Image (spheres, grey):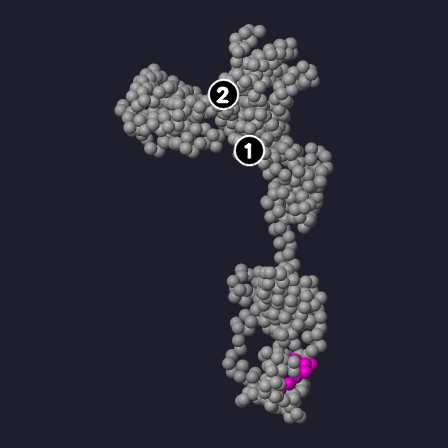
């Protein structure tokens, strides 16, 4: 074969792979392809593209065979029987990439959404486990573009746009500038032929003058660098690509004449140190344009591109872009990932050691350069063909919440590739997923349990928590309303007063206050205090009321002291006795008799040290007055405990005068102290019994 005759066998350790591929492709050649190329001609053209990337023999052979298999899938079995497994794997991977692209193109609405385009690029990369598969597809795409004129105009535009959206960015991602700019320029020719021709014509005008200017500058640069002892320098005029000129014109909103780097020179030097020395010499010789300076050596681009870019103004007013880089940087910029493994081999000094496993080198390289594209993400299709990007380990349920929180809340099952699968199924790149939903949302709290494996993503977990928080708030609102209605009834407040008091707690509305009552973040006592403070009675009314209370106390004495009634008495605040308690009086100076519980520590102390101050006392008219009682509740710390306690007190139609809690962080136990108003021992006992039945309560006692 003529093509084989021109191939230098000394550079191909596995030449027989390429030879056998040519024989297979020749025997199975198909001539009537859409591009009017035979499958053999197309395969050899793809191989030529890959040879410029210094690709290995396996991918060269795969390129030769690929068109024959693409247009005749029946040959796949025969190929697997006669061809190296690595070559077959490369071809299969390229076919898989094409299937993914076709699935997206057939199903999706052509919205042009950037995130969908980005996701499909990532999916195409993630579906292959060998970067050479991507190189194979890029070579195929370039040959397609070069023969696109033979297709209908609609098909031309579709292929050109797909190239811009997917294949040129893939080439850029792999750092293969040599392929990237060709894909862009060929695609741009069909996407915007008017602008392409306009820039092309302007670029070639005065080409003779431009070439002369470049040659003169190169000669001066060589002399300048040589005088400063920089050796082994390569300087050349750089071809500026039409599409990159167009993008810069659009970005800077200018014209072709004002684009700096239509005139460009590239300087290649041996070392990084030489790069900065050359930069210094260039800036000392010509006037630099500061805003056009970029140091991609110190800060490489995301695809590992490295170079120094600067622009200068010459004596005759012409502007020139200069790129300065090492030879190795240049190889990597043009060949991308291929150059990366090439230099790894060269540095090992085993140029002729063909036992090096190139695939291993490639995989190590792609892991180092692009881990996020291959290892920690999965890309799946929705029923409409859109591509969704999730973290590795994401489940069917994670996908449902990524689509929409309502879809997640109503999710009850999932079909993966048309097979019903559990919600805990871990998605794989390329899966087609269809979520099954119910009419009403019913998330499960089990979905939040890490040990059950329903959810992986933080996004989905947050959505589930938000749903339950909303449901809890509705319950808190109902509970708070119930507490308020009882509180208003007990204290003869108008129910509408809640609308006037919420701002006192720095809340936005009355519902927020009711929710706070329901979840016990605001106690009924605190609300009562605010209402009392903001609705004080006039002074004369208070005086009349106090006089009335005084008369009632005189006419209905609470205590009897040795048969005497209407004596001046007061309740001790230390033990707050209530009717039913055994009591003892303590005679004070000028304040009458203070009434204590007989077991109060102050009475016990007085019995030892001041027995003459004590006097027997008994209850009278026990049910005509309310008494304040201090209680202390020891319990496990949990959410909603204060709400449960205050709810029981409200059920008994009792008023809370004060309530607070404190937490012992050492044992996660809480102590709730509260003061309630009651009028007899039976009610107190009933209340304490009900509080002891609350979940988590360990003990209740009077203080």
- Tell me the residue at 37%/28% (across/down): 273
Residue 544, relative to residue 684: is it above or below? below
Instruction: Please identify the quarter of the rendering in which residue 19 is found.
Output: top right
Give whichever of 353, 5 is nearer the camera: 353
Instruction: Tell me residue 159's x, y (percent).
Output: 55, 23
**Which image quadrant: the C terminus?**
bottom right
Q: Does residue 524 appear to the left or right of 263 in the view shown?
A: right
**Which image quadrant: the N terminus?**
top right
Instruction: Tell me residue 303's x, y (percent).
Output: 48, 30
Residue 101, relative to residue 614: is it above or below? above
Instruction: Tell me residue 77's x, y (percent).
Output: 69, 18
Q: Are the two marked residues, 1 and 2, in contact with CB atoms closer than 8 angstroms?
A: no
Instruction: Please identify the quarter of the rendering in which residue 237 is found.
Output: top left
- Tell me the residue at 32%/31% (across/down): 289
Give whichever of 559, 545 is nearer the camera: 559
Q: Please, what secondary structure does the residue beneath circle 1 have?
A: helix
Foreground mark, 1 or 2, reads 2
**Neighbour tally class for label 1: few under 14, some 14-19, many 20 plus, Cα within 10 Å:** few
- To which residue does mark 1 refer? 371
Residue 68, relative to residue 247: is it above or below? above
Residue 663 visible to an observer of this rendering: yes
- Tell me the residue at 35%/33% (across/down): 291
Residue 260 visible to an observer of this rendering: no
- Tell me the residue at 69%/33% (across/down): 417
Query: What stretch of residues is rendered in magenta?
Result: 577-585
Q: Main secondary structure of the magenta part?
A: loop
- To which residue does mark 2 refer? 349
Residue 676, relative to residue 670: is it above or below? below
Which comes before the other along the chain, label 1 or label 2?
Answer: 2
Residue 667 is one of the magenta-drawn residues: no
């Amino acid at each position: 074969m003529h093509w084989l005759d021109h191939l230098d066998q000394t550079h191909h350790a596995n030449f027989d792979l390429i030879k056998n591929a040519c024989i297979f492709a020749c025997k199975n050649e198909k001539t009537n392809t859409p591009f009017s190329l035979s499958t053999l001609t197309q395969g050899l053209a793809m191989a030529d593209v890959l040879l410029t990337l210094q690709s290995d023999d396996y991918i060269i052979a795969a390129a030769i065979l690929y068109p024959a298999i693409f247009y005749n899938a029946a040959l796949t079995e025969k190929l697997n029987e006669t061809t190296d497994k690595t070559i077959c794997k490369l071809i299969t991977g390229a076919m898989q990439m094409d299937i993914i692209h076709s699935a997206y193109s057939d199903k999706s609405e052509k919205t042009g959404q950037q995130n969908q385009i980005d996701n499909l690029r990532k999916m195409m990369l993630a579906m292959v486990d060998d970067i050479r598969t991507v190189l194979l597809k890029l070579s195929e795409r370039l040959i397609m573009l070069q023969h696109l004129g033979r297709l209908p105009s609609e098909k031309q535009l579709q292929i050109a746009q797909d190239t811009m959206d997917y294949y040129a960015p893939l080439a850029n991602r792999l750092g293969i500038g040599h392929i990237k700019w060709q894909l862009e320029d060929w695609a741009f020719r069909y996407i915007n032929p008017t602008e392409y021709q306009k820039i092309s014509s302007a670029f070639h005008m005065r080409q003779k003058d431009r070439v002369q200017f470049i040659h003169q500058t190169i000669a001066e640069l060589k002399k300048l660098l040589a005088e400063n002892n920089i050796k082994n320098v390569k300087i050349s005029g750089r071809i500026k690509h039409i599409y990159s000129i167009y993008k810069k014109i659009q970005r800077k909103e200018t014209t072709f004449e004002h684009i700096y780097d239509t005139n460009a020179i590239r300087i290649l030097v041996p070392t990084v140190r030489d790069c900065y020395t050359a930069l210094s010499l260039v800036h000392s010789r010509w006037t630099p344009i500061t805003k056009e300076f970029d140091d991609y050596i110190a800060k490489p681009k995301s695809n590992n591109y490295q170079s120094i870019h600067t622009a200068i103004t010459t004596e005759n007013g012409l502007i020139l872009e200069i790129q300065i880089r090492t030879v190795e940087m240049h190889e990597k910029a043009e060949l991308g990932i291929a150059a990366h493994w090439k230099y790894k081999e060269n540095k090992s000094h085993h140029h002729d050691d063909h036992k090096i496993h190139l695939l291993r080198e490639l995989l190590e390289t792609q892991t180092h350069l692009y881990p996020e594209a291959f290892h920690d993400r999965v890309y799946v299709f929705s029923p409409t063909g859109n591509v969704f990007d999730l973290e590795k380990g994401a489940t069917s349920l994670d996908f449902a919440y990524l689509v929409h929180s309502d879809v997640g809340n109503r999710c009850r099952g999932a079909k993966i590739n048309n097979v019903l699968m559990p919600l805990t199924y871990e998605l794989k790149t390329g899966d087609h997923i269809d979520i099954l939903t119910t009419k009403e949302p019913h998330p499960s709290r089990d979905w939040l349990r890490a040990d059950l494996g329903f959810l992986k993503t933080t996004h989905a977990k947050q959505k589930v928590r938000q749903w339950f928080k909303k449901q809890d708030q509705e319950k808190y609102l109902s509970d708070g309303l119930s507490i308020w209605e009882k509180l208003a009834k007990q204290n003869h407040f108008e129910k509408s007063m809640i609308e006037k008091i919420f701002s006192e707690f720095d809340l936005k509305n009355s519902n927020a206050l009711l929710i706070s009552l329901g979840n016990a973040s605001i106690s009924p006592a605190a609300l009562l205090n605010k209402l009392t403070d903001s609705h004080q009675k006039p002074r004369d009314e208070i005086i009349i009321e106090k006089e009335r209370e005084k008369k009632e106390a005189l006419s209905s004495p609470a205590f009897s002291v040795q048969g005497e009634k209407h004596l001046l008495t007061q309740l001790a605040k230390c033990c707050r006795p209530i009717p039913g308690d055994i009591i003892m009086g303590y005679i004070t100076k000028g304040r009458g008799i203070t009434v204590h519980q007989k077991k109060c520590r102050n009475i016990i102390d007085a019995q030892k040290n001041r027995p003459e101050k004590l006097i027997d006392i008994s209850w009278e008219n026990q049910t005509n007055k309310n008494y304040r009682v201090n209680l202390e509740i020891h319990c496990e710390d949990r959410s909603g405990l204060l709400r449960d306690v205050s709810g029981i007190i409200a059920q008994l139609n009792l008023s809370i005068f004060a309530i607070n809690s404190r937490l012992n962080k050492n044992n996660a136990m809480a102590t709730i102290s509260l003061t309630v108003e009651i009028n007899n021992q039976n009610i107190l006992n009933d209340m304490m019994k009900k509080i002891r039945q609350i979940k988590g309560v360990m003990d209740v006692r009077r203080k």
